[in-house]
Amino acid sequence: MTNHEKELVSLDELRSVLERYAGPDGPRERPNRNRLRRFRYVLLVAVAVAALVGAGVGIADGVGAFDGIGAANHPQTGADVLDAQTLAGLQKACPSETGQAFYMPFCHLVLDSVRLVSHVPSDGNVYVVTDTRGDLCTLFEAGGMGCGPPLSKSQPITFGTFNPSPTIGGTFIASGLAIDGVTAVSFTISGKSVQVPVKNNVWVYSEPNSHATLGRCVVAHLDDGSTVNPFPEVPCP
């Protein structure tokens, strides 16, 4: 995976890309766990995101994929269970004809591991869930989703962006997860610097009438005053 954790990609967009896919049956193996895998997420999402299929095995509280995400550290309750509409949308996005061709994390989610971590006005409920190989996956009720390796001290946040109409000026959205101890995420957008607070391990920034599509110079700010550059492979302009 060489991409963001979350690009707010709609299910219709994912279906369209998957239907047009004309590559080999096995386009990728298990990815290397490098930091760059989360920074440009849209290509990964088109390959890796699809439907929700529960595995017949339960995941105990504190599953490895959720290490450091305190908001997910609780027994599953009714609030953590995905609603029928979200499940139906995810299932619809996983084409049966390509479901066996290559591994798509969202076709192999473990339903017992779903945890509600936050609620944000622009995206509704935010859930974390793992797949059968231990990826950290994020589901935004409004439709954004993504999978990647568990977070770590060297990469304490995920980062994804979306703008539906950058040429005419649409609403730019950046969002992601953060491990405990990260208080804010800063980055530059169209040459200006913004800083977004983290709440319940989730951060979201939106800007209307924007032509931006990417954030640069991403920095995670920790509660001890230190900072981490989670994507050193991507230079600042």
Image (cartoon, grey):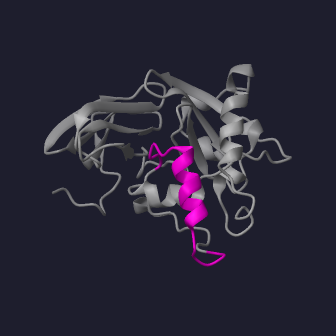
Number of dots carrying numbers: 0
**Residue 171 or residue 138, whichever sits in front:** 171
Q: Is 116 above or below relative to 129? A: above
**Residue 232's quadrant in the figure?**
bottom left
Q: Is residue 21 magenta?
A: yes
> How far across and how far down the image is residue 190, in percent?
17, 45
- Residue beneath the point at 68% across and 21% down: 79
Q: Residue furthest bottom?
A: 24
Quadrant occupied by the C terminus: bottom left
Note whether residue 148 is visible: no
- Residue beneath the point at 43% across and 45% down: 158
**Residue 11 or residue 130, whichever sits in front:** 11
**Residue 168 or residue 220, whichever sits in front:** 168
Q: Is residue 186 magenta?
A: no
Stretch in magenta? 5-26
**Residue 83's quadrant in the figure?**
top right
